[in-house]
Image: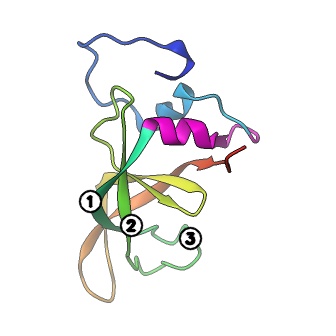
Amino acid sequence: MPKGTEQTEEDTTMKNIYQLRNEFTLREYNTAISREDFEKHFTRTREKVRFTFAGWDGKSYDNESRSASVYRTDIQGYEDARFIKIGKHLHYIMEDELRVEKATGEAHPEASWLVDVLRAE
């Protein structure tokens, strides 16, 4: 676990996703984690997810969807969360926030920014 934290087996419920940021040493005005932390605690899977930024990217105002590979973490309490990495930005998928794409009528989960991932030093 980052920062030397230790958890028991009984503590397996999903935590508030934004608290995951507190598990790392944040850099760049508390907005980024190191590449080392990212590679140590996040693993790319073969799973893909269609999602929308719901306009937060400055483009998808009609909930246009995108596809990305899913990342998972080994940090206890967050194993079931799905993450995506777009450029240097790490986002989490909000499973309970479905948005209907205007063009297709399909519902997709919304993605929300979590942290940036710095380049390797």
**Quarter location, residue 6:** top left
Q: Amino acid type of disc 3?
A: Asp
Residue 76 point in image, percent of width and height: 34, 25
Mark 3 highlights which residue?
57
68 sits left or right of 31 in the view = left
Badge 3 marks a residue whose secondary structure is loop
Q: Residues within 10 Å of mark 2 (few under 14, many from 20)?
A: some
User: Circle 2 is placed at which residue position?
Assistant: 68
Q: Residue at x 27, y 40 (%)?
A: 80
Marks 3/1: CA distance?
Answer: 23 Å
Circles 3 and 2 in contact, beta carbons < 8 Å: no
Is residue 35 a member of the stretch shown in magenta?
yes
Counting from the top left corner in percent of width and height, residue 108 is at 29, 68
Q: Which mark is residue 18?
A: none
At x 76%, y 39%, the residue is 29
Residues under numbered marks 3 and 1 in contact, where contact means CB atoms less than 8 Å apart: no
Q: How many marks?
A: 3
Residue 47 badge? 1
Please give the name of the residue rendered at 75% of the width and 42% of the height, measured from the top-left corner. Answer: 28
Secondary structure type for disc 1: strand
Q: Please determine whether, in this image, residue 89 is positioned above or below residue 59.
A: above
Front residue of 45 and 64: 45
**Magenta part of the protein: which range?**
28-41
